Image (spheres, rainbow, N blue to C red):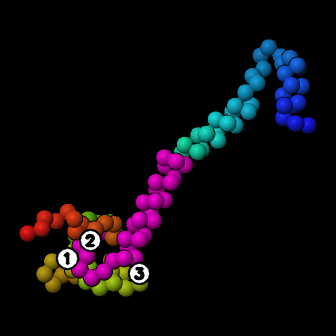
C-alpha cells in the first residue's frame, strides 16, 4: 500500500471529537529537538575536545601553558602521560598531561 493510499483511506474515517491526531507531529518534534541539541551542544563540545587533545599531543619544550589548577609555566620535559613544567626559577612541577588546558604564548606581551 502506498503512502498516498494510506492517507486517503485515513482521511475518509472520522476521528472522535476529543482525540488529538498529532502522533506523527509528536515524533517529528522529538527528532527535531534532538537534532537541534546535537547541532548546538554536542557537536561543538566534541570539536573543542578534539582541539584540546591535538594541542596536548603537539606540546613541545618551551611552550607556555596553563594547568587546570591555574598554574602558569613553561614546558621543560614531556613524557607519555606527564609533563614537567618550569614555574619560577628552579621550581619545576610534574603534572598530568590532561591537566594542561591552554597555551598562553599569545597572551604574553612581546618585548
Residue under the image location 38 percent in, 73 percent down: 56
The spot of residue 65 in percent (x, y) is 26, 71
In the rendered image, the residue lying farthest to the top is 17
Residue under the image location 28 percent in, 68 percent down: 103
Instruction: Say which mark, if any, is on residue 65.
Output: 2
The spot of residue 47 in percent (x, y) is 46, 59
Task: Determine the main secondary structure of the stretch shown in magenta.
Answer: helix
Residue under the image location 54 percent in, 45 percent down: 37
Q: Is residue 97 in the magenta section?
A: no
In primary-sequence order, the first of circles 2 and 3 is 2
Q: Quadrant of the C terminus?
A: bottom left
- Front residue of this view, candidates 70 and 62: 62
Tell me the quarter of the picture where residue 97 sits.
bottom left
What secondary structure is marked by label 3? loop
Q: In this rendering, which labeled residue sits more in front, label 2 or label 3?
A: 2
Q: Which residue is mark 3?
A: 81
Can residue 93 be seen by looking at this rendering?
Answer: no
Tell me the quarter of the picture where residue 30 sits.
top right
- 3 up-or-down from 63: above or below: above
Q: Which residue is mark 1?
A: 87
Q: In this rendering, which labeled residue sits more in front, label 2 or label 1?
A: 2
Asked if the residue under mark 1 is in contact with the one under mark 2, i.e. CB atoms within 8 Å, the reply is no
Tell me the quarter of the picture where residue 54 sits.
bottom left
Instruction: Say which mark, if any, is on residue 104.
Output: none
For the residues marked 2 and 1, what is the alpha-carbon distance in whole angstroms? 10 Å
What secondary structure is marked by label 1? strand
User: Left or right of 52: which side holds 17?
Assistant: right
What secondary structure is marked by label 2? strand
From which residue to which does the magenta span run?
A: 38-67
Q: Is residue 43 in the magenta section?
A: yes
Amino acid at each position: 500500500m502506498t503512502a498516498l493510499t494510506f492517507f486517503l483511506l485515513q482521511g475518509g474515517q472520522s476521528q472522535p471529537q476529543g482525540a488529538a491526531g498529532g502522533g506523527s507531529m509528536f515524533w517529528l518534534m522529538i527528532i527535531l529537538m534532538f537534532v537541534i541539541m546535537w547541532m548546538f551542544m554536542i557537536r561543538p563540545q566534541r570539536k573543542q575536545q578534539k582541539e584540546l587533545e591535538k594541542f596536548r599531543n603537539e606540546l613541545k619544550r618551551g611552550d607556555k601553558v596553563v594547568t587546570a589548577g591555574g598554574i602558569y609555566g613553561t614546558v621543560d620535559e614531556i613524557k607519555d602521560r606527564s609533563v614537567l613544567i618550569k614555574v619560577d626559577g628552579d621550581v619545576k612541577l610534574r603534572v598530568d598531561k590532561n591537566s594542561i588546558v591552554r597555551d598562553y604564548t599569545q597572551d604574553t606581551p612581546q618585548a
